[in-house]
Amino acid sequence: MTPEELSLAISACLKDAVTAGEIALAESAIPAEVRVERPKNRDHGDWATNIALQLAKPAGTNPRAFATILSTRLQSINGVSAVDIAGPGFLNITVDAAAAGALAKAIVEAGRSYGTNTALAGHTVNMEFVSANPTGPLHIGHTRWAALGDAIARVLRASGADVTAEYYINDAGSQMNTFAHSVYNRLHGLPVPDGGYPGQYIADLGHEVISAHPDIRELTEVAALPVIRAAAYEAQMKDIKATLADFGVEFDVFFSEQELHDAGAIESAVARLREQGHVFDDGGAVWLRTTDFGDDKDRVMVRANGEPTYFAADAAYYLSKKDRGFTEKIYLLGADHHGYINRLKAIAAAAGDDPDVNIEVLIGQLVSVNGAKLSKRAGNIIELKDLIDWLGKDAVRYSLARFPADSPLTLDPELLKKNSNENPVFYVQYAHARSRGAARNAVAAGVERQVDGQDSFEASLLDHATENELLSYLGSYPSIVAKAAELREPHRVARHLEAIAGAYHRWYDACRIAPMGEEPVTDLNRTRLWLNDATSQVLANGLDLLGVSAPERM
C-alpha cells in the first residue's frame, strides 16, 4: 500500500461517513488527498494523519470524537491491521506486512515516475539563477546557486510545475565597455585599465578575438572596441555555458539585458508603470514610488541625464516575464542582495501583481572550500571549473544541495574525496552501486523477478524488521519530494536519500537476496529482489533530482 493509496482510502472513508450521516460536513470540505506521514516513533504505527484535527471544527465536533468515527471505518480498509487514536485526535495507522510489502513492486513498476506528484500542477514558474556577468568565468560565488537552482527546478518539475530555468545576461552597461577595454589593452601590450579585468583569461579571450578577426590590431581603438566587445562577449558566454554543462546545469533561456534596451523595453516599462499611477518626475529624474509597497525609499528609473538605471532594467525584465505568461517568478540571489527583496516585490506590486504570490526572492549564503586555490587563469577568483576538476561534479553538487540555502557553508575537500561512509555523497552512491551489484549477483544465482513470464512476488514475505524500516523510508519518498518543492528545499531529498541508504545497508547485512550455496531459489529470494530493485530506483530518482549520477559500480 502506497501513501497515495492510503490517502485516497482515508478520503473515501470520510465521504462514506458524511453520506451515512455520521459526520456533519460538507463534501466539498473533504480534501481529494489526505496527507499521511511517517510518525516519529515507529512504535506508533506505519502512518499518521491529523485530518481529524483539521476537520473537527467545521464538522461541529471535537477532534477525538471525529477520529473515533473515522477510525472505525479505517479499520475495515483492506491491508490496515490497526488504527489507534493518539493525543487530541491523531490517527496512527498500522498496515499488515502484505500491504506494506506491496510498495516494493509498485515502485519498480512506476520506475522513474515514482516520487513525482501533481501538487504544483498548473503552476507556471520562471526561475532565474546564476546570472553571472559575462565579463569573466564562473567562480565559487556562482557555484551554490548553480547547484541549488538546478535542483530546485528539478523538484518543482517533479511536483508538476511547468518551470523555465532562465539565465539573465548582464550584457549592458559600463562593465561591458570596461571588459572590452581590458581585452583591447591586453592585445596591445598595455596595462589593465583603471577598474579593468586582470587575469590570464583576458589574454585568452584576446586570442579568441584574433581568431575571429585577424586584423583587429590594425583598427583604431574606436573602431576596434565594438568588435572586441562582441567577440569577447561571445567567447566568454561560450565558456560559461560549457562550464554549466560540465556541472550538469541546463538553462531553457539565456535572456540578454542588452536586448531589453535595444527593443525599447525600458521606455515601455516606464510608460506602463506610469499608466498604473506609480511613476513620478522629480529633479529632472523619473522615479518609481516603491515606498507605497514597502520599499525603504523610492527608486530612480531614469536619471536626470536621460540614462536609465539598473533598476529600470529590473522593472522591464520583470514585465517581460509577466508578458511571457509566468505567473510565478523566482529569483535566486546572492548573500549581498538582501536589499533587492523589497525593490523587486515593489516592482511586482506596481505591475499589478501580488508580491506574496507572483514573486519569490531566495537569498543564498556564502560558500567556501577549505584549501581551494585561486585560479591561475583568472588570478583573483576560485573558478567553478577548477572545483569540478578537483572534487568532481557529483561531490560538489551533492554537498551544496544537502544544506539549506540560507546557511553559510564550508566544504571539506578531504572529506569529499574519501571513499567511506563519512562522505555523504559516497554513502548514497555506494548504496545504489551496492544494490545494482546485489541484483547482478542474484540474477547470476538464478533469482529473477519473473517466473515463466509472470511476476513472482509475495508481499507478505517482507516481514523482517529491516524490511519494514526500508519500506517505510521508500514509502515516504514522494511526500519528501513534494515538501522539498513546496519549500524550495532540495536538501530534504538529500537527507532522505541518506536515510534510505542507511536502511538499505542494514537490510543488506541482515537479509540475503541470493540463496546460500546449493539452496533452491524461493519466492522469498525473488520478492527480496523486488525490494532491492525498488531501492535502486528510489536512490536513482532522488540523485537525479539533485543532478548527481547513480553509478552502477564503484
Image: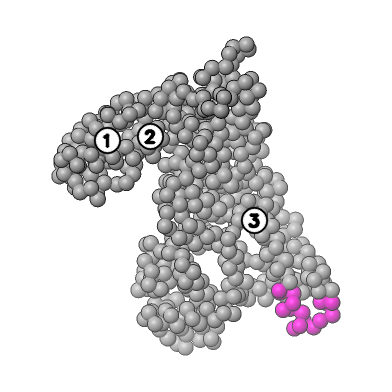
Residue 487 in view, yes or no:
no
Residue placed at 82% from the left, 69% from the top?
Answer: 211
The residues bearing labels 3 and 1 have C-alpha atoms spaced at a distance of 47 Å
Q: Residues within 10 Å of mark 1 (few under 14, many from 20)?
A: some
Residue 46 in view, yes or no:
yes
The answer to which of 162 and 353 lies nearer the viewer is 162
Q: Which mark is residue 244?
A: 3
Residue placed at 44% from the left, 46% from the top?
Answer: 117
The percent coordinates of residue 273 (x first, y second) are: 42, 79
- State which quadrant residue 290 falls in: bottom left
Q: Give the range drawn in magenta.
A: 215-230
Residue 222 lies within the magenta run? yes
- State which quadrant residue 197 falls in: bottom right
* Residue indicated by mark 1: 90
Q: What residue type is labelled 1?
A: Phe
* Residue indicated by mark 2: 38
The answer to which of 379 and 77 lies nearer the viewer is 77
Task: Determine whether label 2 and label 3 are within 8 Å by CB.
Answer: no
Q: Which amino acid does label 2 sit on?
A: Arg
